[in-house]
Image (cartoon, helix red, strand yellow):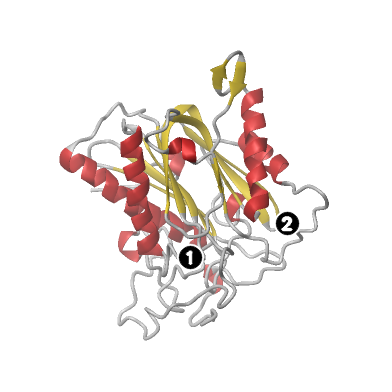
Amino acid sequence: MIRPGGRNLITDVGGLNVGNAGDAGLKSGVTVVTCDEPAIAAVQVLGGAPGTRETDLLEPHNSVERVDAIVLSGGSAFGLDSASGAQAALREMGVGIEVLGFRIPIVPAAILFDLGNGGDKDWGRYPPYREIGYVAARAAAQDFEIGTAGAGIGALSAGLKGGLGSASSVLENGVTIGALAAVNPVGSVTVGRSRHFWAAPFEIAGEFGGCGLPSPMPADATRVLLKHRDKAVGANTTIAVIATDAVLTKAAAKRLAVCAHDGFARAIWPSHTPADGDLVFALATGRSGIALAGDDAIDLFAAAASTMARAIARGVHAATPQAGDLLPTWTARKGQVGAST
């Protein structure tokens, strides 16, 4: 039987810390996952509108196998500056690969679009994301906030505020897997306009409201509800990290990222659209010392999907109201709350 880790956060995976930083007036922020030791890493992009940095090096056929941190940021393409700030913080801490006497932290990053969310984006000549990324990296710790925090501060979904979500699972063989997601999709995380999360079958101990699935299913359950009807292209994206303490090769980490995308499909309707930049980074710290094969490996890849689905629902469930919000939080939803149709 799968159970959550002690924190029910991605930091239940040994060797990882997470830091958040952001600005309430900006309605945007940054989340940084740091690795105590460089971790095996990979990535899988399935959305049609991604924004990324240093993802080519993560392909299994390329030579760099391990990274020092992963950055998730708001700000659309402007948010890619956040990785430079995180990289600067890590370099100050003596983190990074040594090349000809130079210390180079390896910090892949991905961004989501949160520019049109009601926040003040009049930042002048240079966007603030480099400094926000620096602060987030410096804040990395075992415990961190979810919901309206970090890269989830300005996130929106169809009809509801999005947010930063995380969850963890401990498998029967002792391996831990954790997920972190900044949830900003064009689609909906709930069944129609109800309070019921699509991820309900995977919920553990009422971690995102305990509503289960509706019975009977509402008439609008499969209707495609979008955040920005006719204006959605490139204005969304769910970006995430799936991590484990199992011993994985770079190719196996790639497969872990692929399987974690199934969690998107179980938690968001629709997902992986041309209007989303849906992306999953994978990290394997190897802290458990356990290398999986056969059915145990399949269990790990299945848990990647279920844990990711839970993280996505938890991010929306934990969102809190802020001044100037364009959409309500999940906790404010009493029944049929509108989304563009």
Relative height, residue 305 to residue 15 (above, below): below
What residue did someone put label 2 on? 26
Relative height, residue 87 to residue 193 (above, below): above
Quadrant assignment, res 252 = top left
**Going by the image, does 19 lie left or right of 267?**
right
| Amino acid type assigned to the residue bearing label 1 in the image | Pro
**Going by the image, does 153 lie left or right of 55?**
right
The residue sitting at 63% across, 65% down in the picture is: 321
Mark 1 packing: few (<14 Cα in 10 Å), some, or many (20+)?
Answer: some
Residue 86 x/y as whole percent: 63, 35
- Disc 2, SS: loop
Residue 332 x/y as whole percent: 56, 73
Residue 213 x/y as whole percent: 33, 72
Q: Nearer the viewer, residue 45 or 193?
A: 45
- Furthest-left residue in this view: 294
Q: Nearer the viewer, residue 56 or 323?
A: 56
- Furthest-bottom residue in this view: 219
Quadrant assignment, res 220 = bottom left
Relative height, residue 199 to residue 31 (above, below): below
Mark 2 packing: few (<14 Cα in 10 Å), some, or many (20+)?
Answer: many
The reply to whether residue 73 is visible in this rendering is yes
Residue 107 x/y as whole percent: 55, 35
| Amino acid type assigned to the residue bearing label 2 in the image | Leu
What residue did someone put label 1 on? 274
The reply to whether residue 169 is visible in this rendering is no
Quadrant assignment, res 109 = top right
Rounded to the nearest whole Å, what is the CA distance between mark 2 and mark 1?
Answer: 26 Å
